[in-house]
Image (cartoon, grey):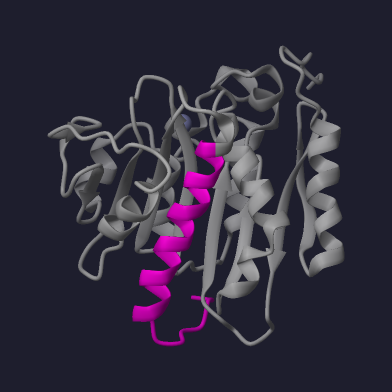
């Protein structure tokens, strides 16, 4: 497929270079596929000692730029070194959408409504393949919301310990929290945090179009987060909030996790 024209001042080659340059700092960067003439990259970091694996995803929606910037700058920040976990990072899951500043990917597919449609578009095939056979301690997916006046979080996990409360408390130092009784059509579990206890098999069957989280819960993990920053705030604050959210989740989860192998 032909490469789309940039609708903004975005430079995908420069983004790729930023990710690739992390190879000098212990990350293994792979081109796991090519979509719209652009590489789709993963960055992995393994201690070789079978630590639990954490998945970080940015840019499922191409018009949510702080997600991509937060994932790339997380690699650059060396913050990953502080935690006794291994990493798989997809810093820009939807390069075509990112380049054109649009939500959807190739073929105008919303990736977050397509994860059970293996044949729908190249991105879904590439991302699903890059996750193949992996088991994650948890996943965090960096998103943005253009209508939200504040930050919020979606957490899916069957039983405690949860990390949503601590993530919200930590992010509140940087951004206001969206304090409403319902978020995403669901009653909040705690201020700014929607929690689902798990996704049942019948719910999976009922939902015709799966977000990434459904695919992850079905095949790769028991604990997912979507971190949602409000787009009306400056980029730097939004990026910092995603980092703080990830850091807070790691602090809670790593503390409560006995050493487990990361493969099924
Ligand atoms: Zn999104």
Quick check: 197 left or right of 122? left
Span colored in magenta: 237-264
In this image, 63 relative to 92: left or right?
Answer: left
Q: Give coordinates of residue 136: x percent, y percent.
A: 48, 66
Residue 139 % position (x, y)? 46, 57
Classify the position of the N terminus by image quarter.
top right
Q: Residue at x 79, y 55 (%)?
A: 30
* Spot occupied by residue 80 in the image (x, y as percentages of width and height): 62, 66
Relative depth, front residue between 177 and 120: 177
Residue 156's x, y, as percent?
Answer: 29, 54
Residue 25 vs 7, above or below: the answer is below
Please give the name of the residue rendered at 55% of the width and 54% of the height, measured from the top-left corner.
56
**Residue 242 magenta:** yes
**Res 88 seen here:** yes
How many numbered marks have been drawn onto this rendered protein structure?
A: 0
Q: Nearer the viewer, residue 256 or 221?
A: 256
Q: Residue at x 16, y 33 (%)?
A: 182
**Quarter holding residue 239:** top right
Report the front residue among 105 and 26. Answer: 26
* Quadrant in which residue 29 is drawn: bottom right
Let me know if residue 114 appears in the view. Answer: no
Q: Is residue 151 magenta?
A: no
């Amino acid at each position: 497929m032909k490469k789309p024209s940039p609708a903004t001042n975005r430079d995908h080659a420069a983004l790729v270079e930023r990710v690739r340059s992390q190879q000098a700092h212990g990350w293994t960067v792979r081109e796991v596929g090519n979509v719209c003439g652009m590489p789709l990259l993963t960055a992995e970091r393994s201690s070789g000692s079978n630590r639990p694996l954490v998945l970080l995803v940015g840019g499922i929606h191409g018009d949510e730029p702080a997600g991509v910037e937060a994932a790339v700058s997380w690699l650059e920040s060396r913050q990953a070194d502080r935690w006794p976990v291994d990493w798989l990072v997809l810093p820009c899951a939807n390069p075509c959408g990112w380049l054109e500043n649009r939500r959807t990917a190739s073929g105008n597919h919303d990736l977050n409504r397509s994860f059970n449609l293996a044949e729908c578009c190249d991105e879904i095939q590439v991302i699903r393949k890059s996750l193949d056979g992996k088991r994650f301690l948890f996943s965090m997916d960096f998103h943005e919301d253009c209508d939200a006046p504040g930050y919020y979080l979606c957490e899916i996990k069957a039983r405690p310990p949860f990390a949503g409360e601590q993530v919200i408390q930590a992010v509140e130092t940087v951004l206001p929290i969206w304090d409403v009784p319902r978020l995403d059509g669901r009653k909040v579990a705690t201020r700014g945090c929607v929690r689902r206890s798990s996704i049942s098999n019948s719910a999976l069957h009922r939902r015709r179009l799966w977000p990434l989280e459904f695919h992850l819960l079905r095949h790769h993990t028991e604990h997912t987060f979507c971190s949602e920053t409000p787009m009306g705030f400056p980029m730097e604050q939004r990026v910092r909030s995603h980092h703080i959210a990830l850091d807070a989740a790691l602090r809670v989860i790593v503390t409560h996790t006995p050493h487990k192998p990361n493969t099924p």
